[in-house]
Structure formats: structure tokens, C-alpha cells
Image (tube, rainbow, N blue to C red):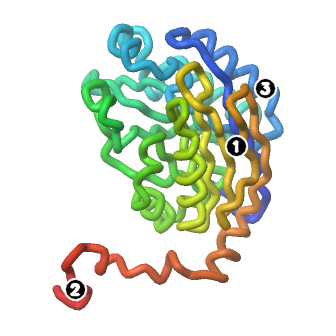
Amino acid sequence: MTHQSSRPVRLAVVQHAMPVGDPEHTRRHLADLVHAHSGADLIVFPEMFVPGYDLDVVRARSADLAEDPRTGPTAQLVSALSQEHGLTIVVGFLERAEDGKLCNSLLIAAPGGDLATYRKSHLFPAELPVFEAGHELPVIATPAGVLGPQICFEHAFPAIATTQALGGAEILVIPSAVGAHHEHLIEVRTRARAQDNQVFAIAANTNSPGFCGHSMVVDPKGRVLAAAGLEDAVLEATLDLSEIPAERGREPSLRMGRPNLYVLGHREDTA
């Protein structure tokens, strides 16, 4: 995947309540939303958007809800939509891995036909009996910029965002299913991860029953560019990726880190 960091990135962030366990309906709605916002360069949907986030339903119906990341219906749909409209799509789905295990994953489809998958690597405790954790923290170059994918609970780990930023990520994309009355986690962590690493951060949270919505878009200074409440919404913003090197020039904290010191009791000058 290639990218161009010099031009503005037109962004759409979807926060729409979807039924649990009706992926065909959700895929139709996804397609309608992409058609309606086809002027965007990047469109981001929440965690487990296609099947709906319900661990009991996942356990009971994994046979018909889990999909192959290359040939499944969601992969085929987002790949076709991405190429048709010339935009990058990020959406949460239930992946069936090669060994048959289930993964809480993202599909990232880019206009050139590239299709990448990210598996949630830091599972929330309730997810541990259900999902197999991923084992990579990638950065993914797309025409909309270099993406650092994370999923929900992972925004609680500052090291993930820093690892991705050091690897070249310009936009942290964080599809989530944060529960009701926990919107403070989205606001504090999204702004902190963006400002800590002087990158853009996108929190795309579900507002389905039991969840808190409050999706947001944050710039490299930690300023909120767009935010939703609990209602169905599609946030729109324009990201100027040139703000990243400008902000890092003003405060070069990322490149001045001393990671060998960040082990308690370890001296940097000790082999």
C-alpha cells in the first residue's frame, strides 16, 4: 500500500447502532454509508461492526458469523467498495483464523486492491475465553496516510501507540466497543495517545445498546476536531498530515526518548 502525506485527508467516522447477529443487514448499511460518504479518503467503522459486539452471540453463532479475512463476504464487499470509490475503509469483523480460532479483527481495504487484517493483540479479560490474541503491532501505509490500527482496550496501553508512531504511523485508528458510562475513557485516552505521540487519533465507538458512543477525532496537539454523543452520527473532519512534523519540530519528545531507561532498575549504559 502506498500513501501521500502531503495532501489533506478527508475523514468520515461512523457511529451507527447496528443489530447483533445480522451481518447481511449490517453489510448493506455499510455499503450505503460508503456510497453516501464516497468523497472521503478514509472511513472508519467501530469494533466488531459487522456481527455486533456480543460475546454470548459470538460463542453461540461463530459458525455463521466468523469470516475468512480474504474471501469472506465482508472482505469482498469492502475491497470492492474501496476500489469503486477510491477510499480506504477500516471496519471491525469476526475473523476465523486458519486454525479455526476466532479473532476480534479489523479489515483495512485500500483503493489499489490491497487488503490487510489486524487482530486485536491485547484482549479485554472477558474476551480471553472467546478470542485468540494477535501477535503483531503493524503500521499500514494507505493512500490516506500510514495507519496504526488498535482495537478498544488497546488504547489503555500507551506503549502500543508509541510503538506504532515510531514505526511511522500518522493516524491511530481505534475502532471500539466501550461500554455505557465509560465515555471518559475514550476522551482521555484518545487525546492522550494523540498528543503523546503527535499523531492524529480516531476513536470510532459503537453506540449500540449497552455502549457509550462518543466517537471522536483528535489532532497531534490533542485538540478534538469532531465528536459525537450517543446518537447515530458520521463525523467528518479534514486531517492535515503536515501538522505531525510541524508539532514534532516544536517539541521533539518522540525522537528524544531513551527506551533503554524504561526498564525499572536498568541502567542505560549497562550492556
* Comparing labels 3 and 2, the label whose residue is closer to the camera: 2
Residue 135 in percent (x, y) is at 31, 46
Whether 91 is drawn above or below 160: the answer is above
- The quarter of the picture where the C terminus appears is bottom left
Density class for disc 2 (Cα within 10 Å; few <14, some 14-19, many ≥20) is few
Q: Nearer the viewer, residue 5 or 105?
A: 105
- On the image, numbered disc 1 is attached to which residue? 42
User: Of marks 3 and 2, which one's residue comes earlier in the chain?
Assistant: 3
State how far apart marks 1 and 3 are (Cα): 13 Å
Q: Nearer the viewer, residue 83 or 198?
A: 198
**Residue that protrudes farthest toward the bottom in the picture:** 269
Q: Are marks 2 and 1 in contact (CB under 8 Å)?
A: no
Q: Is residue 75 shown to the viewer in this render?
A: no
User: Of marks 1 and 3, which one's residue comes earlier in the chain?
Assistant: 3
Left or right: 146, with 43 as reference point: left
Residue 86 in percent (x, y) is at 74, 39
Q: Residue at x 33, y 30 (%)?
A: 127
Q: Are marks 3 and 2 in contact (CB under 8 Å)?
A: no
Q: Amino acid at mark 1?
A: Leu
Mark 1, secondary structure of its residue = strand
- On the image, numbered disc 2 is attached to which residue? 267
Q: Amino acid at mark 3?
A: His
State how far apart marks 3 and 2 are (Cα): 55 Å
Q: Nearer the viewer, residue 232 or 93?
A: 232
- On the image, numbered disc 3 is attached to which residue? 35
Left or right: 37, with 73 as reference point: right
Q: Residue at x 79, y 57 (%)?
A: 8
